[in-house]
Amino acid sequence: MEVITDRKQRPNRDWLAFVKTSRARTRIRQWVRREEFVSAHKIGKDLLKRTLKKAKLALPDKQDELRTAITALGYQDMDQVYAALGRGDLGPTRVIKQFYPDHNTVEVSKKSPTAWERLATRLRISGRGVRIQGVDNLMVQYSRCCQPVPGDSVIGYITRGRGVSIHRNDCPNVLTLSRDPERRVDIEWATEKDDRFFVKLYMNGTDRRGLLSDVAKAITDTGTDISNADMRTTDGGVSGEFSVEVRDLAHLEKVT
C-alpha cells in the first residue's frame, strides 16, 4: 500500500462523505466552520469598508456607541458583524443606518456591490478564470447532485452561510436556482496539474465471484485512485458504489 501525502491539502466538506469515525467527522466540521468564518469575515469587512467609504463615513469612534449598535443588530462584536455581512445574512446599508441613525444622507448607490456581487468579483481572477479549490480562502463546495469536474460547463450559486455551490449547467437544480439570479455567478475552471475531484460511480450487474476485484482493477488500470468502494447484493443481482478521484471530464470518461 502506498500512502500519498500533500502538505497543501486542507480539509473540506467533501471529506465528511469518506471519514469513518465520529471524532474525525467532528474535527473536520470544526475546521470547516472556522475556515468559513474567516473567509466570510474577510469578505464582510471589505464590503463594509467600501460601503462606508462611498458614504464618506467611518466606523464610530466611541466604543460605547459602537457596542450599542452591534447589540441592536443582534451580534456580540464586530467580528460577528463582518462574518454576517460576508455570508449575506446582513446588509451593509442596515449596518450603517444602525451606526448613524440620525445621518439622513446615508444612501448606498444602486451600483454599489451587494455582498453577493462582492463575492462574485473575488471569484473572478483576471485572465485565468477561477481555481475552484481554495481560491483566496473563499468558501466553495461542489454539488453532490451533479458532481461537476473540470471540463463540465458550470455555474456558481452563492448560498447563505456555505459560500459558493458549483453546479453543472445541465443540473436539474439549476432551474430552481435561476429563480434568484442575483446569487448566480459565472465560473470558469482554472485547475492545476495535481488537483483531484471526488466523483461517485454507480453500477448494477449480475453477482459473481471476484466481481468487486475485477471492477476495482478496471478502475485503477486507468490510473485512478479509489477512495471508497461498496457493493451489495440485491434480489436481481448486485449494486455498487465507488468513490474515485479524477482530474477532469476526460479522465472521468476514461474511467467510465
Image (cartoon, rainbow, N blue to C red):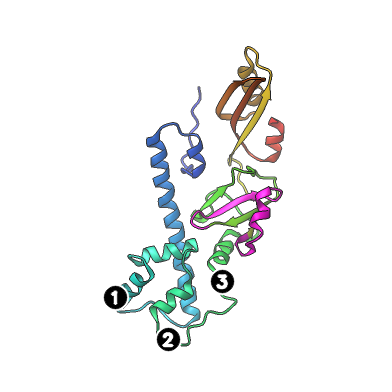
Residue wearing tag 1: 63
Q: Earlier in the sequence, mark 1 or mark 3?
A: 1
Q: Earlier in the sequence, mark 1 or mark 2?
A: 1
- Residue at left offset 64%, top offset 56%: 177
58 relative to 207, above or below: below
Query: The residue tagged with tag 2: helix, strand or loop?
Result: loop
Pointer 2 and pointer 3: residues touching (CB < 8 Å)?
no
Q: Dots 1 and 3: beta carbons under 8 Å?
A: no
Q: Position of residue 123 (x, y in %)?
A: 58, 59
Give the magenta part as a residue range: 160-184
Residue at image mark 3: 113
- Can you say which quadrant of the picture contains the C terminus? top right
The question of residue 176 being in magenta is answered with: yes
| Foreground label between 2 and 3 | 2
Mark 1 closeness class: few <14, some 14–19, many ≥20 residues within 10 Å = few
Q: Is residue 188 something one can see in this rendering?
A: no
Amino acid type of the residue that numbered disc 1 sits on in the rendered structure: Gln
**Disc 1, SS:** helix
* Residue at x-position 54% and y-position 53%: 135
Q: Position of residue 182 (x, y in %)?
A: 62, 65
Residue 103's label in the rendered image is 2
Task: Determine which quarter of the picture holds residue 148.
Answer: top right
Whether 226 is drawn above or below 198: the answer is above
